[in-house]
Image (spheres, rainbow, N blue to C red):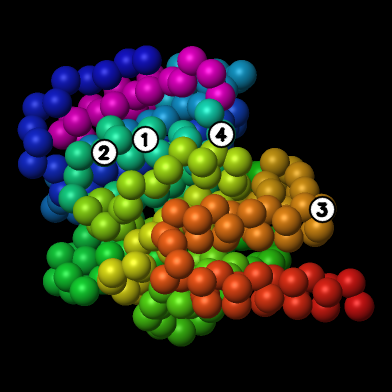
Amino acid sequence: MLYCTIVSTNIDISILILCYNAEKFLDDCLLGVFNQQTEATLQLVFMDDCSTDMSFEFATKLIKSHRPKFVDIQLIQNPKNLGCFLNMKKGLSFCTGKYIAYLEADDYWTDINKLEYQWQFLRNNPNYSGIGGGCQFVDEEGNKIEQKWYNLKEDKTFTNKDLWGYPPFQTSTFMFEKNEIANMKDNMRETISNDKILYVFLSKNKLLKYEPSIVSNYRFHQTNISHRFSRFQIFLKQINVNTLIFKQLGIKYSFLYVKSIFKYSLNYVKCLI
């Protein structure tokens, strides 16, 4: 575990990068971060979830070579694998910025103004707790491929009731207000749905904004969820994460929870026909 000294607590945006065995993708990921053009003060938090390749060493070397870009850098390697949710939760505890830009290490930003635009939007629209954008599907080499989902083409404002189903946009496009994150319990460690958890919790008290402009590339490869799990396994995992969220949020969300289970079940049955 490596920490760089904090030279300022006045940080606008914390860039949270979650990594597991992404060494071959880190050039693209970090270049997209380094190329951002923004007036915001930046913190970089890199969370390596006990990778078995050289991800942490490679990222450390590359990030330290761009040290002046950031007010603060936190480079953390977990001594054991925590899984995607607990790695995110631990990473959030190191983020000191007012806003957090989420990025998994196999994806990468393609719009150099992503941070600046989203930061200004959230600053000027306090009734929104987060903003997402469009993404482009690419293969392991970065070549454009079929857009399998995340196809929303118009601006949209989401309320909590809209976000209990399949996530409408990809997390690599997302920036959100740290103050709106609830005290998420560790019982969500079994989930694979950081996006669902973030979107539901962040929309409890405020709105989420979506704009379709492409701001990132989403790398679709053999370790993605849709490759690793069957349709039935994904169905069960979506039911599981909604159940865990409901248990934490409480009876007030009963209708949305039951409605989401019905919709997931109906979609699954349709896929079998």
State the residue position of label 4: 83
The residue indicated by pointer 3 is 230
Quote the CA–CA distance across marks 1 and 3: 29 Å
Q: Residue 164: percent from the left, percent from the top?
A: 53, 69
Q: Secondary structure at mark 2?
A: loop
Which residues fall within the magenta stretch? 60-81
- Of 2 and 61, the residue lying toward us: 2
In the rendered image, residue 163, in percent from the top left (x then y), is placed at 49, 71
**Quadrant of residue 23 in the image?**
top right
Residue holding disc 2:
95
> Disc 3 marks which amino acid?
Ser
How far apart marks 4 and 1 lie (CA) works out to: 12 Å
Q: CA distance from mark 2 to mark 3?
A: 35 Å
Give the CA distance from mark 4 to mark 2: 19 Å
Mark 4 vs mark 2: which is more N-terminal?
Answer: 4
Quick check: is 131 in the magenta stretch? no
The 10 Å Cα crowd at callout 3, few under 14, some 14 to 19, many 20 or more, is few
Query: Foreground mark, 4 or 2?
Result: 4
Q: Nearer the viewer, residue 253 or 99?
A: 253
**How many callouts does the rendering have?**
4
Q: Is 164 placed above or below 89 here?
A: below
| First in residue order: circle 4 vs circle 3 | 4
Looking at the picture, does residue 58 appear above or below residue 217? Answer: above
Q: Earlier in the sequence, mark 2 or mark 3?
A: 2
Which residue sits at x=39%, y=46%? 184
Q: Which residue is mark 1?
A: 91
Task: Tell me the element at label 1.
Answer: helix
| Badge 1 vs badge 2, beta-carbon distance below 8 Å | yes
- Circle nearer the N terminus (1, 3): 1
